[in-house]
Every structure is written in C-alpha cells, then in structure tokens.
Image: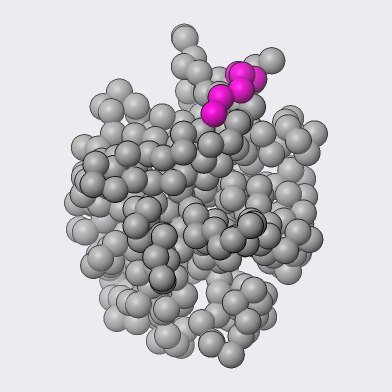
Amino acid sequence: MQLTLTRPDDWHLHLRDGPLLARVAPHSARSWGRAMVMPNLVPPITRLDMALAYRRRILAAVPEDSGFEPLMTLYLTETTDPDELRAAADHPQVQGVKLYPAGATTHSDAGVRDLARVEPALAVLEETGLPLLIHGEVTDPAVDVFDREAVFIERHLEPLLQRHPRLRVVLEHVTTEEGVRFVSQGPANLAATITPHHLRLNRNAMFQGGLRPHHYCLPVLKRERHRLALLEAATSGNPRFFAGTDSAPHPRRAKEAACGCAGIYSAHAAVEIYAEIFEQAGALDRLEGFLSLFGPAFYGLPRNRDRIRLVQQPWTVPERIDLGDDELVPLAAGETLRWQLQPVAD
Ligand code: DOR
Ligand code: ZN
C-alpha cells in the first residue's frame, strides 16, 4: 500500500545552529517543504536581520536541491521594538512571532514576564496580521507542571484574545483536552499545532521501568485522556489543528543528566510517525489535510506543489544518531515503524 500526498510543512521546528544545525536540518529537508523555525537560540533571534542571517545558515545546511524553505520567527521580548515587528510583517521570509513566557522552557529566559509590557507589540501583530505563536504554559511555581497549559489558557490566552480579537494566534504543541476544547470553540483566527510525540505517548512513557529522559519535553507528556483528545482533534478534519513536530534536538549527555534538557527529537521520522498514528486511528484519508493543507490555509500561504510518497514497508529506527562528539536518541529509537518515505519520480 502507498500514499502520495502534497509535500507537508512542519509548523514548529527547532533547528539549532552550528554543527548541530548541519546534522539535523537535512532530516527535516528530506520530508517537509517548509518549516516554521523557532527562534530560541542563544542569543535569541529578536531582530529581522538576525532572522535573515539565521535563514541563510539553515539554507547552507540543507541539500541545495531539497527545495526546503525555512520560515522564520522572531522571539518576542519585553523590549521588542514594535517597528521591528512592522518590518518583519512586511518581509515574506518571516511568518511568525514567538511568545515564550520567561522560564517556561529551553532558552526562554529572555521571554515575557508580564504580558502588559508587550501590549504595543501585540497591537502591531493584530494590525499587520503577523501571527503570534504561543508556548502556552504558566511559569508560576505554585501551579502543578501538568496543569500549566490549562491554567495559561484561563489566565492569559482567553483574556489576550478578548483584548485582541483579530490577533492571529497559534497555540503551539497543544497537549490537553482543555487546549483542544479552547481551540475548537474559539474563533477562526485561533489554531493549534500537534506534535507526533504527544500523539504517540502519554506520561507513562517518562517512567516506563525507570526514568526516561528521552521522553521528557515541554509541555510535558500528559495522561491518556489528553492524548486521546489530541488524537481526536488531529484526525477530525478540523482545519485549525495541523502538524508541528517541535522536534528539539539535545545531545544525549544533556538529556541523560541530573537536570536533563526538555526536548524530543523527531525530525528523522516525524512524517512516518504521523502516518502510523493516523493509520491506527483509521483516518489515513485525513492525513494530508493535517500535514499539508490546513497549515498553509491558516497562514495564508500557497500549498506546496510537489508531493511525497509513503510506502507501507516496515523499518527500524536507529537507536542513535551520530553527532561526532555526542549522539541523539531519536523518538521511537529501536522501534519498528510501518511507513517509509520514498522519492517520488516525476
Ligand atoms: O521540549 C521542548 N524543547 N519544549 C520547548 O518548548 C523547547 C524545546 C527546545 O528548544 O529544546
Ligand atoms: Zn518548541
């Protein structure tokens, strides 16, 4: 059995920089036409010139004939100049502005502590139509880590959308039933991305026979009923849910540590894993919408014109991906997947 689909786009991706960028970017370029590239480098990508320079480094890291197109994002800080956002909104290579609550995740220290301080910036986004991509978790240490998304929605996202009813917002990597409900019932200018790991795993995966650092990410994996809500949303055909892998490589030594980094690497097989999940849900006919059509529709971009082919042919994911001085442990390491990507001859 085989499937031919419009080439998909990854609406949430961490590509890093330097040697790690060179190692991981070809994995994404193999499957995806475009990717929304997260700006949480050190230092963060806060200005248009930085985003454009980073984009050139990404293009230098992928095969020239891949046709891969990085879509850049700016990192919103409390000192972001609204004029910088106006310039970014006019630039076709920038397609989003990322809001990290300060301290919510990897390299988010420069993020936003007080949303009131970015009101002028949000007003510019609302006016220009440049989307705001949100890491939707509160950082309040009094809030249980498994509740941080639901509390963010109630305390911050709902009021923010009331203050800015035309603001285009993506609730990135939605992980809860509450998040799914909020987006489903929300306005057309609100959407969400869903990762392969939150569709494949529940929080038991972090503790299976011992502590499993390679299954630790943020937002953290949730209980089964949340995974089922995500699966239902992804396979529902609702165009406001689309693919965003949040593939986030950290070298093995940084994951297997007393204070291990958050992030799951999936770029090596994300399309194949999404296909398997949709097949198991009996929803292969909805896969193309989720992977390839709903994202461009939300962002107002054309669909990719080329196609990919998925063939049902089991293969085993490598246990490790070599990084020279370290290695990556990828999602589904050592497991057998049912679908394989093959070149389309045309
Ligand atoms: O698990 C995560 N890793 N979540 C994020 O939000 C950031 C990412 C990273 O950059 O490593
Ligand atoms: Zn991310």
**Residue 210 left/right relative to 346:** right
Residue extent of the magenta highlight = 311-316
Q: Residue furthest front?
A: 209
- Asked whether residue 85 is in view, the answer is yes
Left-right relation of 316 to 111: right
Where is residue 302 shown, x and y percent of the image? 49, 36
Q: Position of residue 86 (x, y in %)?
A: 33, 65
Residue at (47%, 44%) from the top-left corner?
Answer: 330
Q: Is residue 58 visible?
A: no
Of 10 and 79, which appears nearest the observer? 10
Q: State the scheme by which the image is colored.
A: one colour
Q: Is residue 147 above or below residue 237?
A: below
Principal SS element in the magenta part?
A: strand
Residue 314 magenta-highlighted: yes
Along the viewing direction, whichever of 81 and 63 lies nearer the viewer: 63
Looking at the image, residue 262 lies above or below residue 247: below
Residue 300: image location, x then y, percent: 51, 46
Does the magenta run of residues contain 30?
no
Above or below 27: residue 3: above
Q: Nearer the viewer, residue 159 or 14?
A: 14
Q: Residue at x 55, y 80 (%)?
A: 138
Quarter of the picture containing the N terminus is top right
- Residue under the point 52% across and 23% down: 341
Residue at image location 79% in from the left, 61% down from the top: 225
When the figure is inspected, residue 238 is found, relative to residue 185, above or below; the finding is above
Name, please, the residue furthest toward the bottom: 142
Question: Relative to 207, is 111 on the left or the right?
Answer: left
Residue 315 at x, y = what percent?
A: 56, 24
